[in-house]
Image (cartoon, rainbow, N blue to C red):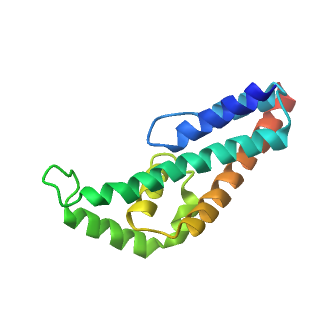
Amino acid sequence: MIWIYLSLFASAFLSATLLPGSSEVVLSGLVVKQQGLLWLLWLSATMGNVLGSCVNYWLGLKMMSFQDRRWFPIKAEQIAKGQRVFDKYGLYSLLFAWLPVVGDPLTLLGGVFKVRLSLFVLLVSIGKALRYGFIIAVALGIERWI
């Protein structure tokens, strides 16, 4: 039974990195098939996804140490523009780290712009926990119709 939670954790972890993934589909399938305890499914998905976002954060922190290299792909003007956008929408944009397409880059920017790690984890966790709770609720609703 533990393999269910570990598989979901791994799927959520990979989905949160810059790699493609679909932890929502895995979670929904497990809920609809009544595989595992709901709260453990929710916890596994949330923790995996938050830890995957922390990898992006770390990559953002580390990548800036190479910004003075000629081969570095991001120009100083682009970094400044990113800082302005991040400042405009504030730290609370990290609550939307669960969004497709923009969520992973947001977590990378959290590291680039050196958001305090505890605040980063708190904001990202809230958004991702709410998202997975919503997915479980929708999957439970779908299960009634199947």
At a point 54% along the width and 62% down the height, the residue shown is: 94
* Location of residue 91 in the rendering, given as x and y in whole percent from the top left corner: 51, 71
Q: Is residue 130 left or right of residue 107?
A: right
Q: Nearer the viewer, residue 27 or 146?
A: 27
Q: Is residue 75 left or right of residue 98?
A: left
Residue 4 found in image quarter: top right
Say which quadrant the N terminus sits in.
Answer: top right
Q: Is residue 85 left or right of residue 12?
A: left
Q: Is residue 134 left or right of residue 55?
A: right
State whether residue 37 is above or below residue 69.
above
* Location of residue 127 in the rendering, given as x and y in whole percent from the top left corner: 64, 58
At a point 48% along the width and 69% down the height, the residue shown is: 115
* Location of residue 11 in the rendering, given as x and y in whole percent from the top left corner: 60, 33
At a point 53% along the width and 53% down the height, the residue shown is: 54
Q: Nearer the viewer, residue 74 or 6?
A: 6
State whether residue 96 is above or below residue 80.
above
Residue 26 found in image quarter: top right
Residue 121 found in image quarter: bottom right
Say which quadrant the C terminus sits in.
Answer: top right
Q: Name, please, the residue furthest toward the left.
A: 70
State whether residue 32 is above or below residue 79.
above
At a point 53% along the width and 50% down the height, the residue shown is: 53
State whether residue 69 is above or below residue 138.
below
Tell how many labels: 0
* Location of residue 111 in the rendering, given as x and y in whole percent from the top left corner: 43, 61
